[in-house]
Image (cartoon, rainbow, N blue to C red):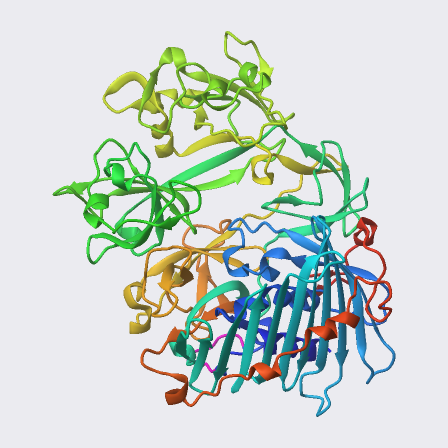
Amino acid sequence: MRSTLASSVLLLATMLASAFTTGSRAEPPATGAYVSDPQTEYVNDDVSSFIEGVNSVLCAVAAIRTDAMVNKARYVGLVDSGQCSAQAGSTGASDGSKRYSRVSMTSTRSSADGVQVARGHIESVGEQMFIGVQVAPSRHGPDDPPDVVLDTSYLQADSSRAQSRLRVSDSGFSLASRGGAQGAAPTLTGRFVWRGNTDTGHGVMEQGDAVQDLTRFGQNGDYYCREQEASGLSLCFKRARSAALSATWRWGVYNDSSGDRFTLDQPGFLLQREATEEWGYANYGGIWVPGALPDGDRVRSVAGTPYTVHRAAGRLVRYTTSTTTLDALDRVPLQVLTNLGDPFGPEEAHTLYELHWSKALQRFVPVEPEDCSSGPCVAAKTWRAGELQRRSTAGALLAWSDALGPIGIEPQLVSGLHAGNSVVRTTRSEVVVPDSEGAPLDLVCVRNCPIAARLADLAVGSASYASGTEDPGNRHAGVDLAHVTRYRWDPKTYTLFDVQPADGSAPMAFPDVRPSGLDMGNMVDARWLQGLECVGQPMTYCDARALGMAEYYRWEMGPEPHQSGVFLRSDDGRYVRFSAPVRARFAVPDEPAYAEFAGAVLPVEIHAFDVLTGIPMRCADRLSGASVRCSSDAVRVSAFELPFGAQGFVTVVDPTASAGATPVRKWLKWLDRELHLQHAPGITPATAGVVLGDPRDLPDLSELDGADPGNPADAAAYAGPYSADLFKLEPAVVHGTVLE
């Protein structure tokens, strides 16, 4: 049943996609998950955006495996919120952390060839969400998709209500939806219909309140076209996959020869909070459970191992650095955010530049800038490459790499421009685990150094810092010895102590009521204080100098999970250490299709849960596909498509292996990706031979009258009243994987 239900989901999500073909010219694995793991792709279009909500629900239904849980009583499944959100392509944390939604479901079928009925609830903040699914065997043959009816009902906290019904069959699908105040006539309605398959067909979309906006669309083997009735705007797009842009959300990584999945040693595990019986997850990116985990709380892994929660006032992060050259980072994607203190001129401040260094051209090559000065990044001014090339020798150019983390580039200028032999310092971070060795006991700070007394008074901003260390952002401004702030680290209690002479010795506590995190400067081993001396200024100490040391630290404090230190301690006193992402290298094929990246060797990171970072991205015009400034009107896509087959692998060196060890090959396979079809200028529906949909095929909203899974009177779909207790069962499924 899984394959047939998945076929219906795919029919809905990929109605605009053409058949996938690929070739293999080498010897990738011929067995294992590398061969059997399914691939799913979705087409993003103005029309498909109408069905994002119901598509997210369908994704959740597929992820909790109702097909594998038939007649097994009510169960709870965890759904990766990132993968099933309406904007799945823009989520996904680079640290591999996850956020799950819980689904309570009952799946039944009276006979082997009978109708499968699934009823339940999706956990959601601020609303009650009911779902009902009926999956009937195909009327034509066992290999054809089943007939699916999906009913959803949302009851908002403000008493408004939304309702929808989706019907899927081998001839297409239809969607009817409506919403408004509880007990009143609906104020928003929407209708959608598609007649055909993934090769040819036509449809209509209608949505709005008092005024309905109607769009007709259709496709054949070569083109997809849509026409908006109100504006008369008519556009056609090429359906050839070779012309489409893509963005991959999930990657599979596989072992050589066997084709088995490559997994981290300790990627994470399910856990249950004993006090509330609620379930969550723990991994390298942190611990997720509904609500907060207080210090001393007890949890239990899905394997039954008990742990005690240790929540500290913050977390100590160790940064280790290594050096290379700018030429060695040839074509590695970088991001640079300018600040007021940078010498770009006032019109270039607060601009995020995406760029890479070209060894061949001996200059930075821009992608496009974003303006981030007032909230979300929007389209910025015209790129001025010369301004970014010229740097004063006051300090390093600070950048970010998704694969390497923070980067500092110390300029070696030639005629005012960067030279390829400029020193580059790459940095890797890790959270120090309680009771672990290695962190220095005495630390010093010279910029934005908070002190315990002021934190205890709930001081905010610069008032939290030791006098003389406050700084609005210039890391190159120094302080004298009298203003060096000192701390003491206690690994046993995981506490940072403020040991300023004026304040005595007090824990560095961070009050829970503080609304946001605190920007603290870098700390280094007190024995290395001399290494912080500013260039040309003896006995004056600069924060930026810490970035050039082999190791430095930061104490992070705040209300967010990534700002707090939360750890699990087993009953024998040992703390759980989750596996960090694995660094690897991808050799880009030296072929024209890879444009400026052809022949480059790019660093990437393999994270838990199918996350791969470091692959170049760009922002593209929705119609032409040309690179443009990143904005809400552009789409973010891969700069090139990674090959699946002969050249689709990365190499990994075991960090515990001896020097000169042979790298190990790991194969890549995209699992979920999004496609953006490209505009075909001059083509119309008539010249393309595309038939557009007929509004008379739209579903009647009256069929929603008897299809409400949130209504107790609808016995076929109603799963009972919504309650938080529904989600406290031990999860039986984690996003597609049925637990043994």
Res 36 visible: no
Give the position of the C terminus as an image quadrant. bottom right
Image quarter of residue 13 = bottom right
Which residue appears at 59% of the width and 28% of the height?
A: 514
Residue 664 in the image: x percent, y percent? 47, 62
Residue 457 in the image: x percent, y percent? 58, 16
Residue 427 in the image: x percent, y percent? 41, 41
By secondary structure, the bulk of the magenta-drawn segment is best described as: loop
Residue positioned most to the front: 210
User: Which residue is nearer to you in this view: 598 or 728?
Assistant: 728
Residue 232, compared with residue 367, is above or below; it is below
Q: Is residue 456 left or right of residue 21?
A: right
Residue range of the region highlighted in magenta in the rendering: 21-29
Which residue appears at 30% of the width and 53% of the height?
A: 356
Which residue appears at 81% of the width and 61% of the height?
A: 75
Image quarter of residue 262 = bottom right
Residue 417 in the image: x percent, y percent? 17, 44
Residue 164 located within the stretch drawn in magenta: no
User: Which residue is nearer to you in this view: 636 or 143?
Assistant: 636
User: Which residue is nearer to you in this view: 690 or 410?
Assistant: 690
Residue 24 located within the stretch drawn in magenta: yes
Q: How many marks?
A: 0
Res 224 visible: yes
Residue positioned most to the bottom: 140
Give the position of the N terminus as an image quadrant. bottom right
Which residue appears at 52% of the width and 86% of the height?
A: 199
Q: Is residue 711 left or right of residue 647?
A: right
